[in-house]
Amino acid sequence: MERYPLVEQRFSPFDFYSSMRKNNPIIFDEENERWGVYRYNDIEKILRDHSRFSSKFGPLDLPLGIPPEYEENIHRPSLINSDPPYHRKLRSIVDTLFVPIEISKLAPRIENIVNELIDKIIEKNNNTTTSTMDLISDFAYPLPATVIAELLGVPFEDRDTYHQWADVIVGLKENSNIDYIKKVSKTFDEMDVYFSKLIEERKKSSSSTQDNDDDDTLIGRIIRAKVDEHFLSESEILTFSHLLLNAGHITTVNLIGNSIFSLLENPQELKRLQQNKNSLIKPAIEETLRYPSPVQLVIRIANDDVTLSEEKEGGGGREIEKQEIKIKKDQKIILFLGSANHDESVFTDPERFDITRKNLRHMAFGTGIHFCLGAPLARLEGQIALRTLLERFDNLQFDFDYSDRQDLYTKFTPLKSSLFLGLSHLPIRFQTKNRQ
Ligand code: HEM
């Protein structure tokens, strides 16, 4: 039995998840030696129990039996795949920069970037009243890529290069043959060379200005940080930089793309939003995080033998059967956040995209000690992007004949990834409003 939604269900995995929550809420995949967990409460328990369920594995789900040198190169110890106390130490280097109050200071710069991107789109359309764009490549990708590049101190002109790196890494789960794994490992090597040069330049320029604290980029901060009285090693700085660059843009592209897609698919919600922008932009972004969650799963590994209890409906759908699930030490566990966010025991009418939903306890950013560092940034970017698009454009529509979600698989390009839910392209049509 499949533990992951099939490739053609990846943009709409919700029926699959619903059936798993009902019939196989915690299930072992013998062939790949992984557990799949689908219910909100089970996932929450596991994520909050970091002493028994370790992150020392990483977000990339490599197949069994790959040569250790590639596994080591891809699964390097970093913030996202470490446990306390090392995790706490790494996180403290960047934590204070990512709190909402600090992130809110970036709003004017994000608004500028958004408006510049929109100006370019209008210009490309020669200022015609009805215009078109690919929402992903013209807008949703360059926005978070520019923001994280500026924060890190990475030249934005290199975005094509790091776009390609991100594509290779994202494609890993679906192409887990040895040649592809070599390609991913080579990508990590290329990123090392790139960041090594950048780090060297930063070190040189801060020593020449005599003021080590002058460099307020994230890379500068990571270079200066001390953990247990020691500076981070070159390899730790490199891995931290890779993580922030990738996590900072791959995910938020999907948040922006999925928000417009969901609103166009639910015109009554779009109308409500247009009439109540001030009050509904934030909840619309939260509902996009819940419904088409940009990150669909996270992974843990059992530190010890653990017994969980599972309840499922017995025959005839009436009796509840209780069963003990024994997870063995070192077994991997895939936690489907995308399924948790549609769990009917937590969300009323979960298959409805409802921007006035009151319960916002979604798990799109995970939970527990690894709760997404960039959540305030992703939210702010999503809110500014959505608000500005609605302020500057009218009559937003799909620029293709959309009748149901299945059409997307024949005409367009939903990501094939089981980790990320989003689109590679989203052609839309719109009219430009006159700016007051
Ligand atoms: C909509 C956008 C985003 C989504 C849905 C998302 C989702 C997630 C999730 C689910 C985790 C938990 C991983 C786990 O438990 O194993 C996570 C962790 C993380 N995210 Fe995000 N993320 C987003 C945007 C960002 C941004 C903009 C950054 C930029 C800095 C970022 C940086 C990180 C980092 C560094 C971690 C690791 C935190 C830790 O291990 O303590 N994310 N993210």
Image (cartoon, helix red, strand yellow):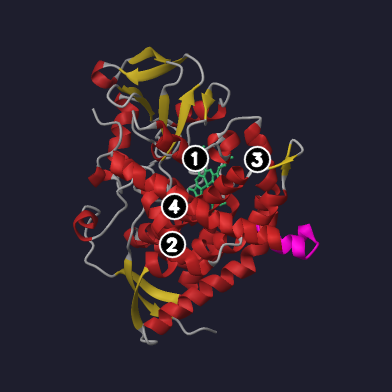
| Mark-to-mark CA distance, 4 and 1 | 12 Å
- Name the mark on residue 90: 3
Query: CB under 8 Å between callouts 4 and 2?
Result: no
Single out the mark in the foreground, 2 or 1. Answer: 2
Looking at the picture, how far across and down is residue 93, in whole percent?
A: 69, 45
The amino acid on which the numbered mark 2 sits, given as a three-letter code, is Thr
Stretch of the chain drawn in magenta: 205-217
The amino acid on which the numbered mark 3 sits, given as a three-letter code, is Leu
Residue wearing tag 2: 161
What residue is shown at x 32% (from left), y 15% (from top)? Answer: 319
Residue wearing tag 4: 288
Q: Nearer the viewer, residue 38 or 2?
A: 2
Q: Residues within 10 Å of mark 1 (few under 14, many from 20)?
A: many
What residue is shown at x 69% (from left), y 61% (from top)? Answer: 204
Asked if the beta carbon under badge 3 is closer than 8 A to the nearest atom of ligand 1, the reply is yes
Query: CB under 8 Å between callouts 4 and 1?
Result: no
In the rendered image, residue 207 lying in the magenta stretch gets the answer yes
SS at badge 4 = helix
